[in-house]
Image (tube, rainbow, N blue to C red):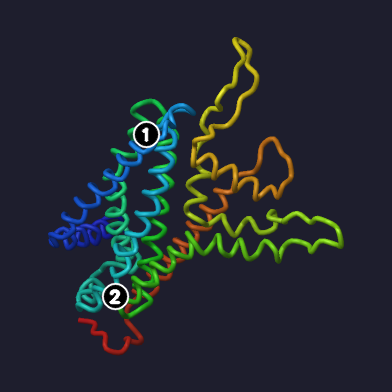
Amino acid sequence: MTARGIGLVARQEIRTRLRAGRWKALLAVWFAVVNGLGLMYRLTLESEHVTSRGSAGVPMFGGVLLGVLVLTLLVTPALGGQTVNGDRERGTLATLQVTRLTPAEITLGKLAAAWGTGLLALLLTLPSVLWPVAEGAVGPWRALVTLLVTGLLIGVVCAVSQCWSALLARSVTSVLLSYLTVFGLIVGTPLLFTIAVPLASAPPGPGDYAPDRTDRVWWLLAPNPVVVLADAAPRLPGATVRSGDVLLYTRSQRNDPLGQLSRGVRDIRAGGAYRSEKAPVWPFGLAFDLALAGGAVWLTARRLRTPVQAVPKGVRLA
């Protein structure tokens, strides 16, 4: 496996995508819609006098970034969900397989092209995301970390979508299952957590109150991309409360969506136990997502090995 082979496949995939003029139109629409929604959100925050409780840039950054993450993950399955079986349906996959390119090079090249397109979609959202950074409401380090995590999560979904494309004969089915996978990560994990909490908690005795043992099932929430992003975001400096020149106490930013969600999932992991510093959740969630992506890449490469022992019914090789 060489970087040159991966680059050749990636460039071919990108040229194929660019030859279709609709991609340029779709990216232009994406840029206008996402940044337009970000502008309207900012105007809404300012009209509701959020600035009286702090800078409007703080809730704008968190809200826009969470929205961008969800929207990008909803678009990503279309990028990788037909990279393998789409070529197989057109009879062009065998052209790559009979060359000196290895299955790993073909897999990683196609993944790089899909991931790069997803990162381009993320890049087009930067005007709204970096607005609060430019005005000083959010630090550059927080913006860099959250954008990096978002980019990694886009790559995870691209890898899983490509795996479905390699496993299934029809691109329509693989794209559908890719969307179901994203739905399972974003919506399915909170549903499983909600169902598991009563099962993990001990039933209360007569006249007793038994707290929910969320510390036993917190890991069900960890793979959720929204949880990973929010908990991985560096904490903002606390807001100080003074009486004259006397500092009374420092509290967390109340209008920070990322911080509020992070504190919530860390409380869930603690299970109600009081700790001054509660353990983070995002390392476990991100590790699970990256392991899922690694397994998907490995399985895709195995499906691209030649010679092919069995051909799906109705599918041509060349």
Give the residue displayed 23% in from the left and 84% down from the top. Answer: 316
* Rendering quarter of residue 80: bottom left
Residue 159 picture location, percent across and down:
38, 62
How crowded is the residue under tag 1: few (<14 C-alpha within 10 Å), some, or many (20+)? few
Give the residue displayed 25% in from the left and 51% down from the top. Answer: 30
Q: Is residue 295 left or right of residue 84?
A: right
Residue 214 picture location, percent across and down:
68, 55
Give the residue displayed 31% in from the left and 89% down from the top. Answer: 313
Residue 47: which numbered mark, if any? 1
* Rendering quarter of residue 170: bottom left
Q: Foreground: 286 or 307?
A: 286
**What is the three-letter code of the residue carrying label 2?**
Asn
Is the residue 292 above or below the residue 167 in the image? above
Q: Is residue 50 left or right of residue 84?
A: right
How crowded is the residue under tag 2: few (<14 C-alpha within 10 Å), some, or many (20+)? many
Q: Nearer the viewer, mark 1 or mark 2?
A: 1
Give the residue displayed 40% in from the left and 44% down from the top. Answer: 65
Please state the total of marks drawn on the protein image.
2
Q: Earlier in the sequence, mark 1 or mark 2?
A: 1
SS at mark 2 in the image = helix
In the picture, which quadrant includes the N terminus? Answer: bottom left
* Residue 146 visible from this viewpoint: yes
Q: Foreground: 230 or 282?
A: 230
**What is the three-letter code of the residue carrying label 1?**
Ser
Residue 183 picture location, percent across and down:
44, 64
Residue 304: which numbered mark, if any? none
- Outermost bottom residue: 313
Is the residue 55 above or below the residue 154 in the image? above
Residue wearing tag 2: 85
